[in-house]
Image (cartoon, rainbow, N blue to C red):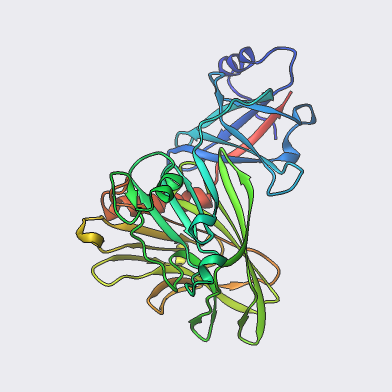
Amino acid sequence: MKRITTLPLVALLLATSCADEPYSLVTVRNSTGLPRENETVEIPWSEIPATLDGKLVVADSNGAEIPSQIIYRGGDEPLALLFQASAAPGKEALYTIRPGEPSAYPARLRGRLVPERYDDFAWENERVAYRVYGPALEATGEISNGIDAWVKSVRELVVDKWYAAGDYHRDHGEGLDCYKVGRTLGAGAMAPLVDSALVLGNNFTTARILDQGPIRFTFELTYAPYTVGDSVVTERRVISLDAGAHLNRVEEYYENAPAMEVAAGIILREGEGIVWNDAANGVIAYWEPRNNDNNDDNGHTAVAVIFPQKMKETRQVANHLVGIADYSLGEPFTYHAGAGWSKGGFATPADWSEYVTGELTRINYPLWVTIEKK
């Protein structure tokens, strides 16, 4: 689709590109009443002109380079171009794509296998960190395929430092791991639901990084086959986290699965927490009771799960609040889940509710992107 834009801004954009080099003008439109700040835009590689098929630089309307990333999903061929855009409610913003060598951007994402801690796989951005548990931990008898959340109050990457120090269950001014997973879904994992019971798998068996940033970190987990009803099912998860986001995008794949329900959810705690339960909009969320581990005031962890696909109902199952849906055989089930902290940007339950509501809007109404090719 072509778009006609006001001459002065187009002239400015053209002036920032060399006259003899190819470029594309990208229009990003915000059709909602919500300010969209530094939100990831994904352009399929098939939409990138052949004249730009190589090393690319993305620039804003002032001609300043902004971070970008080519997505490969673990393969050899590019699949999409990412950058983060901002647009006021009901307004457009303009960007350009031109040939060039991208700069070395500051790290805002990181993830890795952690063999020095029983094969954890940990990943983070500048706002939150997560981990899942691997085969070396399962060999000790500790089994969990839930998602653990590490909360932090600093806008920097901390996972390697915390592992090296070995004292991340206490807040030393940056945050901590006070989230208890155990044999649960933790902060938003998924499991088959059979006869109203969760069928939990074991720890992951393999982990593979698919994309490493600077905009998106993506990795794949595989799990050993396990019994679901009368079938032996193989599970695979692909998890992505974008810079600046609190929620992961999770794709669940079940092979050899029967027609079944699946449930993604949140472990509930003893004490006075606050639950949001909105199956009609595909949202469950939780403001945990205050955590006082080590006799410290560790604040409140907040968790949310959003189903863009159909959430049939919500229910409490084995001390969890879960959203339930039908799994379509051979297709991934895609949803979003993650955490925040009362000492890390969400001072009140209302702050978390506002964030989750905003994320629901961003997921359901992504920024509209068109490209005008030179």
Q: Residue at horizontal 27%, vertical 72%?
A: 270
Q: In this view, does 172 lie to the left or right of 235?
A: left
Residue 33: give x, y in percent of width and height: 43, 42
Residue 58: give x, y in percent of width and height: 61, 27
Q: Which of 372 and 274 is in front in this view?
A: 274
Q: Is residue 300 above or below residue 63?
A: below
Q: Quadrant of the N terminus?
A: top right
Residue 326: give x, y in percent of width and height: 59, 74
Res. 251 image quadrant: bottom right
Say whether residue 329 is visible. yes
Res. 255 image quadrant: bottom right
Q: In this view, does 247 lie to the left or right of 345?
A: right
Say whether residue 290 is visible. no
Q: Residue at horizontal 55%, vertical 46%?
A: 366
Q: Is residue 40 above or below residue 196?
A: above
Q: Is residue 328 left or right of residue 135?
A: right
Residue 106: give x, y in percent of width and height: 51, 31
Q: In which quarter of the image is the C terminus?
A: top right
Q: In this view, does 113 lie above or below 145?
A: above
Q: In this view, does 168 lie above or below 4?
A: below
Res. 76 image quadrant: top right
Q: Residue at horizontal 38%, vertical 53%?
A: 166
Q: What is the total number of numbered labels drawn onto the structure image?
A: 0
Q: Which of 320 and 366 is in front in this view?
A: 320
Direction right: furthest residue? 50
Q: Residue at horizontal 48%, vertical 67%?
A: 146
